[in-house]
Amino acid sequence: LCFFLGSLAYPRRMAKAIARRRGLDLLMIQGSPRDTFSSVRKAKGCGPSEFLGLYKNASFICTDSFHGTAFAINFRKPFYAFCRRGYEKKSSYHSRIKDLLDILGLSDRLVHPNEPKEVDEEIDYVAVLEQLERHRRISIDYLKRSLLL
């Protein structure tokens, strides 16, 4: 499953290579005008429940979207998150993705166009979900304290 908001060619090429190597069909949730005329099969009429269903049932996810990355993690899917642009700057489009992946120990899943890589190791979602739960508790505690002030 692919969901790209940016227009870089590299993530699309890598998604095709992953699909070919793993024997998977490629399905695109169209987020970028670049994909309008591509030959890749597209998800049509994709509302919120269909969008989440595609993520839930995906075998592998390639995305450059923060929310796409978060859904991949929450559904415990193998994935790559790609930088869509501005990857050379500290305050770039991918900073939320980078921060999320760093917190969860998934930094190796962020792919820069100028640093091609592929990680074939499975994701240890037990460790990831422990970190995610810990950070959720911290956030909820902060909100509770803030609302009581």
Image (spheres, rainbow, N blue to C red):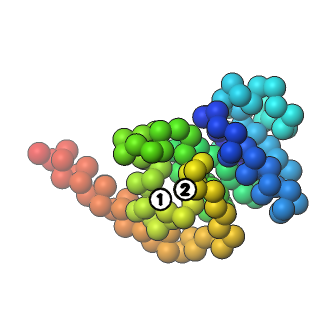
Determine which residue is flagged by label 2: 110
What amino acid is at disc 1? Leu
Q: Circle 2 — which element?
A: strand
| The residue positioned farthest toward the left in the image shown | 149
* Mark 1 residue element: helix
Q: Position of residue 85 (x, y in %)?
A: 53, 38
The answer to whether residue 93 is visible is yes
The mark found on residue 80 in the picture is none
Residue at image x 29%, y 61%? Answer: 138
Percent x, y for residue 96? 42, 47
Q: Residue at x 70, y 39 (%)?
A: 9
Q: Residue at x 57, y 60 (%)?
A: 109
User: Would you name the residue on which mark 1 appears?
Assistant: 101
Amino acid under disc 2: Leu
Q: Where is 64 relative to 100, above or below?
A: above
User: Is residue 132 visible to the viewer in this orientation of the structure?
Assistant: no
Name the residue nearer the viewer: 34 or 73.
Answer: 34
Neighbor class of circle 1 (other Cα within 10 Å; few <14, some 14-19, many 20+) is many
Residue furthest toward the front?
A: 114
Instruction: Identify which residue is drawn at 54% across, 64% down.
Output: 108
Query: At which x and y percent is residue 149?
Result: 11, 45
Q: Tags 1 and 2 in contact by the CB under 8 Å rule?
A: yes
Most foreground residue, 50 or 60: 60
Between tags 1 and 2, which lies in front? 2
